[in-house]
Amino acid sequence: EPEVTQTPSHQVTQMGQEVILHCVPISNHLYFYWYRQILGQKVEFLVSFYNNEISEKSEIFDDQFSVERPDGSNFTLKIRSTKLEDSAMYFCASRGGTHNEQFFGPGTRLTVL
Amino acid sequence: QKEVEQNSGPLSVPEGAIASLNCTYSDRGSQSFFWYRQYSGKSPELIMFIYSNGDKEDGRFTAQLNKASQYVSLLIRDSQPSDSATYLCAGPNQAGTALIFGKGTTLSVSS
């Protein structure tokens, strides 16, 4: 069964450093998403991506964040200058089906020191 | 601002019992709802979605949607210890493409 994959599983970085999180969505899906979950809190929407451009972003997704689809399979989230409060699980999801069914990858745990 | 609300629990049931998980949502116009299961430290796993009023059954799981009451529920029959997890209810956001999640209900099934 096809699945969303994410790398790395855990990323530790120093405050102020740039990080890039990688995702490979399910191959025939067209909509891609990033969500995050701070420990003990809700899963929160960050950004959606369709047809090589951002289709929607939340207020969390400020100028420090960017997304890219550098080739036909990868989908990346970049955080330019990490802050302590960026520490969270970051989930990539891709959407297939007619009812907005989103399938999540295993996540990247980002720890900012 | 659309919201999805869940009782965080924990909900404790004995093995073999029916677990009933509930969710309410703020926007009467929302069409589809999703139940995800999340084990500790893992990602959300889609277990069911529902978009019509009434019940939808899949194996031991039944999702129920009542649009008039803005209420969604998930019943798990013959609960197993492996069902112990946090169950997340999700509905569409304002634009209808991304998901808004509730805080989740933690279910504990004791053997």
Image: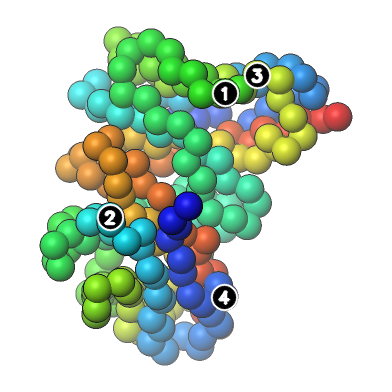
Report which residue position mark 3 lands on: B77
Q: Is mark 2 on a helix, strand or loop?
A: loop
Q: Residue B59 bears which disc, if any?
A: 1
Q: Where, by quadrant of the figure, is residue B51 drawn?
A: top left
Q: Mark 2 points at which residue?
A: A29
Marks 4/1: CA–CA distance: 35 Å
**Which percent across, then down, holds residue B22?**
51, 22
Q: Quadrant of the C terminus of chain A?
A: bottom right
Identify the amino acid type marked 1.
Answer: Gly
Dot 2, crowdedness within 10 Å: few (<14), some or many (≥20)? Answer: some
* Residue type, label 3: Arg
Q: Where is residue A63 in the image (x, y as percent from the top left)?
A: 22, 74
> Marks 1/3: CA distance?
9 Å
Q: Can residue A58 be seen in this view?
A: no
Q: Which of marks 2 and 3 is in front?
A: 2
**How many other residues sit within 10 Å of disc 3, few (<14), some (14-19) or many (≥20)?**
some
Q: Residue at x 77, y 34 (%)?
A: B81
Which residue is label 4 attached to? A10
Residue type (three-letter) at the residue carrying disc 4: His
| Among numbered discs 4 and 2, the one appearing first in the sequence | 4
Q: Is residue B94 above or below residue A27?
A: above
- Mark 4 crowd level (few <14, some 14–19, many ≥20, 10 Å Cα): few
- Mark 1 element type: loop
Amino acid of disc 2: His
Q: Relative to A60, does residue B100 appear above or below in the rendering?
A: above
Which residue is nearer to you in this view: A70 or A64?
Answer: A70
Tag 2 subunit: A
* Residue depicted at 14% across the width and 66% down the height: A53
